Image: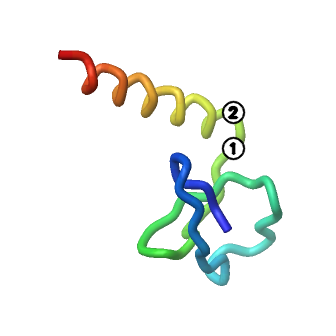
Amino acid sequence: MVDLGGIRKEISVALVDGVRVGDYVIVHVGHAIGTIDPDEAERTLALFAEMAAQEATP
C-alpha cells in the first residue's frame, strides 16, 4: 500500500528486492520500479508541493 499524494493505492513490489514498510519507492503503472533515498524523496515531494501551490495561484 502506498500513499500517492493522499491517495492510498495497492501496488506490486515484486520488481524491487528488499522493500520495507516506510521505504520510498518510484511507482509506474501500479508497480514499484525502484527505491529512493528518504532525503531525496522529501526534497522531491517538497518541489511537487511548491509546483502545485504555484499552479493554484492565479
Q: In this view, does 57 lie above or below 15?
A: above
Residue type beneath disc 1: Asp
Classed neighbour count for the residue bearing mark 1: other residues with Cα under 10 Å, few (<14), some (14–19), many (≥20): few
Q: Which of 8 and 20 is in front in this view?
A: 8
Pick the residue in front: 13 or 1: 1
Residue name at image x 35 percent, y 30 percent: 52
Res 54 → quadrant: top left
Horizontal relation, residue 20 to residue 34: left or right? right
Question: Left or right of 43: which side holds 17?
Answer: right
Quarter of the rendering containing residue 11: bottom right
Q: Name the residue under label 2.
A: 39
Which part of the image, by quadrant, shows the N terminus?
bottom right
- Which residue matches tag 1? 37
In the rendered image, which quarter is residue 32 located in?
Answer: bottom right
| Amino acid under disc 2 | Asp
Residue contact between numbered discs 1 and 2, judged by CB atoms under 8 Å: yes
Q: Residue furthest top?
A: 58
How many marks the image carries: the answer is 2
- Residue at image point 42% right, 74% down: 29
User: SS class of the residue under badge 1?
Assistant: loop
Task: Give left or right: position of 54 versus 38.
Answer: left
Residue at 82% of width from left, 64% of height from top?
20
Question: Is the residue 16 above or below the residue 23 in the image?
Answer: below
Residue 46, given in percent of the width and then of the height, sits at: 52, 27
The C terminus lies in quadrant: top left
Q: Which residue is drawn at 27% across and 24% down?
A: 56
Q: Position of residue 24 (x, y in %)?
A: 67, 52
